[in-house]
Amino acid sequence: MVDVERFRILLEAERERRMILIPALREDISAANAARQDSNVDDEHDPEGATIAFELSQASALMRQSNESLQQVEAALRRIAAGSYGRCEVCGAPIAEGRLEARPWTPFCIDHARGQSGGRA
């Protein structure tokens, strides 16, 4: 039997981390955009331009990942509230506790995670 309360605490802590991280990433993106606009940078020929473009790309990717993670965490918390946490959304089988340890927000057992993520469990 999965200790749902323990996972709820873990998920709430992860949600708090994401809620702090996302505004910080927004600031990084804004700063990189401002730096890009404040300079006449030719990204192809100016070494500093490539750095700004890279930083903006990295911050944007982290922002997307953080938003996706936050949505997954919130969905897991909704499953806890609904009483369905720890069961695969596809087959209804229990999700192995080891899998929940690694990815407490996962809605899929390992077999169905492979099918949902194109091989990434």
Image: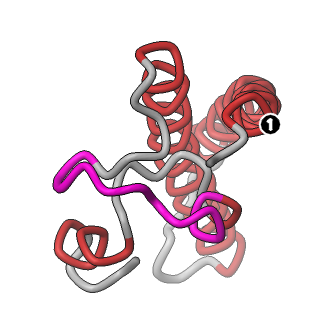
Residue 116 in percent (x, y) is at 20, 66
Residue pointed to by mark 1 = 6
Q: From the viewer's perspective, is 108 left or right of 104?
A: left
Dominant SS of magenta comes to loop
* Frontmost residue, 70 versus 115: 115
14 versus 121 height, above or below = above
Residue 108 in percent (x, y) is at 34, 57
Residue 82 figure quarter: top left
| Residue 102 within the segment the image draws in magenta | no
Give me the residue at 20% from left, 79% from top: 118
Give me the residue at 59% from left, 39% from top: 33
The residue range painted magenta reads 89-100
Residue 72 in percent (x, y) is at 46, 39
Q: Residues within 10 Å of mark 1 (few under 14, many from 20)?
A: few
**Which amino acid type corresponds to the residue marked 1 in the rendered image?**
Arg
Q: From the viewer's perspective, is 8 left or right of 109?
A: right
* Frontmost residue, 77 versus 71: 77
19 versus 61 height, above or below = above
Residue 22 figure quarter: top right
| Residue 97 within the segment the image draws in magenta | yes
Q: How is the image coloured?
A: secondary structure
Q: Residue furthest top?
A: 81
Q: From the viewer's perspective, is 87 left or right of 41?
A: left
* Frontmost residue, 80 versus 22: 80
112 versus 12 height, above or below = below
Element under disc 1: helix
Give me the residue at 72% from left, 23% from top: 19
